[in-house]
Image (cartoon, rainbow, N blue to C red):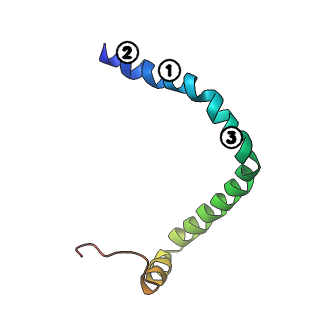
Amino acid sequence: MFYSLGLGLPLLVTAVWLDRFLTHFRQIRNYVRPLSIMSGLLLVAVGGLLYTNSFFLLTSYLERSGIGWYIGQ
């Protein structure tokens, strides 16, 4: 019973809210492509930092800027 409820409830909620989602998606449709491109460039940049073992440059810059936290504090 709970398996069926867990499987069916998300599908039911999706069916009920699909029209509202599509209405909101039409409003932000123009921003999806630029956002996808920017996030892809960020992913490539972080991948490049990891590949060259230079990720510490980013983390040290963020720590100097006051962005971040230390484990144990």
Q: In this rendering, is residue 44 above or below 19?
A: below
Query: Could you tell whether 40 is left or right of 2 in the image?
Result: right
Front residue of this view, candidates 41 and 21: 21
Label 1 element class: helix
Quarter of the image where one finds residue 56:
bottom left
Q: Position of residue 33 (x, y in %)?
A: 74, 51
Q: Position of residue 58 (x, y in %)?
A: 50, 78
- The residue positioned 56% from the left and 23% from the top of the image is 16
- Callout 3 amino acid: Phe
- Callout 2 amino acid: Ser
The reply to whether dot 2 and dot 1 touch (C-beta < 8 Å) is no
Q: Which residue is mark 1?
A: 12
Q: Position of residue 23 (x, y in %)?
A: 69, 35
Mark pair 2, 1: CA separation = 12 Å
Looking at the image, tell me whether mark 2 or mark 1 is earlier in sequence order.
Answer: 2
Q: Residues within 10 Å of mark 2 (few under 14, many from 20)?
A: few
Q: Which residue is mark 3?
A: 25
Q: In this rendering, is residue 44 above or below 10?
A: below
Mark pair 3, 1: CA separation = 20 Å
- The residue positioned 56% from the left and 65% from the top of the image is 47
The reply to whether dot 3 and dot 1 touch (C-beta < 8 Å) is no
Query: Could you tell whether 4 is left or right of 28 in the image?
Result: left
- The residue positioned 43% from the left and 21% from the top of the image is 9
Circle nearer the viewer, 3 or 2: 3
Q: Quadrant of the N terminus?
A: top left
- Callout 1 amino acid: Leu
Label tally = 3
Report the residue that reaches farthest toward the bottom.
64
